Amino acid sequence: MKMNEVRAIAKKWNVNVRVGRSKRDIIREIQAAEGFTPCFGTRTICDQYKCLWRKDCIGDE
């Protein structure tokens, strides 16, 4: 997902997208707001099948 898409989703969750924050950090904060474990980019196997970031994170559909 492109950064402009991530920013749009972040705004919906009131997540700060200030300059200097990494895409990974923003996504992790969004994950927490959505009720998921903030784990983007830390796993190779994921059991969170409904997570919006799953495909970008581990490349699985």
Image: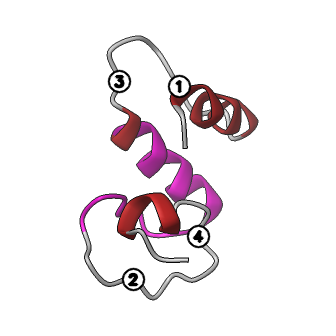
Q: Does the magenta stretch include residue 26?
A: yes
Q: Distance between the residues labelled 2 and 1?
A: 26 Å
Three-letter code for the amino acid on which mark 1 is drawn: Asn
Mark 3 or mark 4: name the one nearer the start of the chain.
Answer: 3
Marks 2/4 in contact by CB < 8 Å: the verdict is yes
Q: Note whether 13 is above or below 37 in the view shown.
A: above
- Secondary element under disc 4, as helix, strand or loop, is loop
Q: What element carries label 3?
A: loop
Say which of marks 3 and 2 sits in front. 2
Residue located beneath label 2 in the image: 46
Mark 3, residue position: 21
The amino acid type, in three-letter code, at marker 3 is Arg
Going from N to C along the chain, the mark reached first, 2 or 4, is 2
Q: Could you tell me which residue is drawn at 37 percent across and 59 percent down?
A: 40
Report the quarter where the N terminus lies. Answer: top right
Marks 3 and 4, how far apart at CA: 21 Å
Q: Residue at the location (26% across, 77% down)?
A: 44
Compared with residue 44, is residue 52 higher up or lower down, i.e. above or below?
above
Distance between mark 1 and mark 3 Cα atoms? 9 Å
Q: What residue type is labelled 2?
A: Cys
Residue annotated with mark 1: 16
Task: Compare marks 2 and 1 and give the one earlier in the sequence.
Answer: 1
Q: Is mark 2 on a helix, strand or loop?
A: loop
For image coordinates 59% across by 53% down, the residue present is 33
Q: Which of marks 1 and 4 is nearer the N terminus?
A: 1
Residue 51's tag is 4
Closer mark to the observer between disc 1 and disc 4: 4
Q: Which of marks 3 and 2 is nearer the N terminus?
A: 3
**Residue 30 percent across, percent down from the top left:** 55, 48
Q: Is the residue under label 4 in contact with that under label 1 (CB below 8 Å)?
A: no
